[in-house]
Amino acid sequence: MLEQYRDRNSLIHTVHARVKIIFTLVFILAVNLTPAGTWTGFILYFSILISIIMLSRLGIRYVLKRSLFALPFILSAIPLIFWGPEPVNHIWLLNRVQVPFSLVGLERCISITLKAWLSVQAAIVLTGTTPFSSIIEGFRQIHVPLILISIIELMWRYLFVIVDEVTRMMRARTSRSTQIGKPYHSGGSVLWRAQVTGNMAGSLFLRSIERSERVYAAMLSRGYTGEPLSVSSTNLSKKDQWITVFSCMMILAVFIFSLFTGR
């Protein structure tokens, strides 16, 4: 399932979507502006996230498992370890190859990884406690450009259509290439699989264009103008206002503390 929302009876689920969006944006901005090597600040950010996860009843294991999506970001930061700023030490690999090693680069690499990891966790908490329709409405209420909202909304909706199309194509491929005696294994060599996959990708591209034209024509026939026909906008309650102020002040306090304790 592509939908990340998990229905729970928790305090975080009852908070207005606009409040959670503002908190997530402020949190991600503060985390990424925090100086590298401010380990105490990163621990405080992580503690705040763990507290929110526990209040939301999403499950720490669920959030941490999905946050592994941030691990590929470390690939872009690994070169800093070897070509980072001075001082640069050298270590011998197998007593033959001399490899440069920068402690400052290692510190920056770990900091970039932690920033990406914490940011992804914040986004997971947002999508896990807020329905997609509420997130889109929250974006409208904080005056995100309408063209950007329309792109995000249509991309998300159409993604389900593409997944269904891919599922049908894979089912058709399996039914046409199953080996005798191996009903759950598609036949063919690696080269054959690569060729079939390439053909499927091209066919999916053409089908997606044709399908998008039909979907858009159906939307226009039903009165689509780029904006929802009915919007249920609700104002922030006193509780939501206090939560917004308190959460942003807490993040700001951690950020200021990180500036004074960082290098």
Image (cartoon, rainbow, N blue to C red):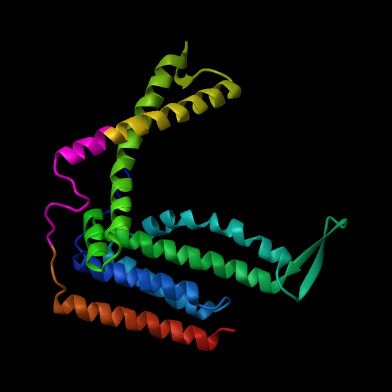
Q: Measured from the top left, where is residue 20 in percent x and y? A: 28, 68
* Number of numbered callouts drawn: 0
227 part of magenta stretch: yes
Horizontal placement of 168 versus 46: left or right? left
Please determine whether, in this image, residue 205 is positioned above or below residue 136: above
Q: Measured from the top left, where is residue 49 in percent x and y? A: 38, 70
Q: Measured from the top left, where is residue 186 in percent x and y? A: 48, 20
Q: Nearer the viewer, residue 224 or 130?
A: 224
- Res 139 → quadrant: bottom left
Please determine whether, in this image, residue 133 is positioned above or below residue 236: above
Q: Measured from the top left, where is residue 168 in percent x and y? A: 35, 26
Horizontal placement of 29 versus 229: left or right? right
Please determine whether, in this image, residue 253 is positioned above or below residue 214: below
Q: Residue furthest top?
A: 180
Residue drawn at (27%, 65%), measured in percent from left and top? 56
Horizontal placement of 255 versus 246: left or right? right
Quarter of the image for the N terminus: give it: top left
Residue drawn at (50%, 27%), measured in percent from left and top? 197
Residue drawn at (33%, 66%), measured in percent from left and top? 53
Q: Nearer the viewer, residue 140 or 44?
A: 140
Q: Residue furthest bottom?
A: 260
- Res 83 → quadrant: bottom right
Where does the magenta region start and end?
Answer: 214-232
259 part of magenta stretch: no
Q: Nearer the viewer, residue 66 or 182?
A: 66
Quarter of the image for the C terminus: give it: bottom right
Residue drawn at (32%, 51%), measured in percent from left and top? 151
